């Protein structure tokens, strides 16, 4: 499958966007200022576009060169009304691009095509196996930088910790607090 993700950049591409030498990008990467990963078996580095945007904003660099300016979010919930309400609230943020899925099957199809940076998944959704979806995201190399955020209203601290122990990156316990959800999404993409 020759469907390369456009949101994973080489050091050469980053150098071109930032108008610096490739060795400068390598230095940023090696000192941990710019997060990414190395290609197994090689010295080549790859930087997620969302991480580059975070880095550029932190260093007051203009981001107009990057066409990947939206953070792609996939909301998974069997209750389409809840999913759409959450999606509409998130879309008010101009830097978010949001899709919804109402079944595990839809979630898989949309995730492959949309390549979300963050997946928000309702743990209490009927007919959706959130843990199975989380495991599949973790196994898929094309979704290697995708953060999976679980949400369930009213979970206690120890229940939320148990959710994190299953492999989720974050757990939201107050689904009506859009500011908190937005903050969690921003935290998630900052560590991609």
Image (tube, helix red, strand yellow):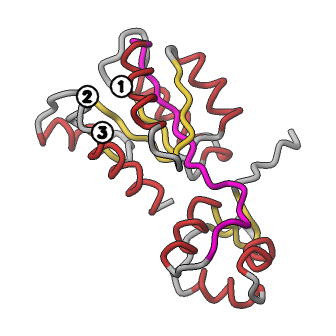
Question: Which region shows up in magenta?
Answer: 62-80
Pointers 2 and 1 in contact (C-beta within 8 Å): yes
Mark 3: give few (<14), some (14-19) or many (20+) Cα within 10 Å.
few
Category of crowding for the residue at label 1, using alpha-carbon neighbours closer than 10 angstroms: few (below 14), some (14–19), many (at least 20)? many
Horizontal side of residue 126 vs 67, given as left or right: left
The residue located at (68%, 33%) in the rendering is 112
Spatial CA distance of label 1 from label 3 is: 15 Å
Q: Name the foreground residue: 187 vs 60.
A: 60
Image point 63% across, 55% down: which residue? 69
Vertical side of 86 occupied by 37: above or below: below
Instruction: Tell us which disc is closer to us: 1 or 3.
Output: 3
Above or below, comparing residue 99 to residue 95 in the picture:
above
- Which of the labelled discs sits on residue 178, or is there none? 3
Which numbered disc, 2 or 1, marks the residue that appears first in the sequence?
Answer: 1
The kind of secondary structure element at disc 1 is strand
Q: Identify the main secondary structure in magenta.
A: loop
Residue 153 percent coordinates (x, y): 20, 27
Q: Mark number for residue 152?
A: 2
Number of the label disc, if any, that sits on residue 89: none
Numbered disc 3: secondary structure: helix
Look at the image and say whether residue 98 sits in the magenta stretch. Answer: no
Q: Please report whichever mark, 2 or 3, sits nearer to the chain's N-terminal start.
A: 2
Depth check, front residue: 120 or 91: 91
Estimate the spatial distance between the alpha carbons at disc 2 and disc 3, rounded to whole Å.
14 Å
Q: CA distance from mark 2 to mark 1?
A: 6 Å
The picture quadrant where one finds residue 127 is top left
Residue 37: image location, x then y, percent: 62, 67
Q: Work out which residue is located at the far right of the displayed protein and give it.
A: 2
Residue annotated with mark 1: 122
Say whether marks 1 and 3 touch (CB < 8 Å): no
Residue 145 at x, y percent in the picture: 57, 52
């Amino acid at each position: 499958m020759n469907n390369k993700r456009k949101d994973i950049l080489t050091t050469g591409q980053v150098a071109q966007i930032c108008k610096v030498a490739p060795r400068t990008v390598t230095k940023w990467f090696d000192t941990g200022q710019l997060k990414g990963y190395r290609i197994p078996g090689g010295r080549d580095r790859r930087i997620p576009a969302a991480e580059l945007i975070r880095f550029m904003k932190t260093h007051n660099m203009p981001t107009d060169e990057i066409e990947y300016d939206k953070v792609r979010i996939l909301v998974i919930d069997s209750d389409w009304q809840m999913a759409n309400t959450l999606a509409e609230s998130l879309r008010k943020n101009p830097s978010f691009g949001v899709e919804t899925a109402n079944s595990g099957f839809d979630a898989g199809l949309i995730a492959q095509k949309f390549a979300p940076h963050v997946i928000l998944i309702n743990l209490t959704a009927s007919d959706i196996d959130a843990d199975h979806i989380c495991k599949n995201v973790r196994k898929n190399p094309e979704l290697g930088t995708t953060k999976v955020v679980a949400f369930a209203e009213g979970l206690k601290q120890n229940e939320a910790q148990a959710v994190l122990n299953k492999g989720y990156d974050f757990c939201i316990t107050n689904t009506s607090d859009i500011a908190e959800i937005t903050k969690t999404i921003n935290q998630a993409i900052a560590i991609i």
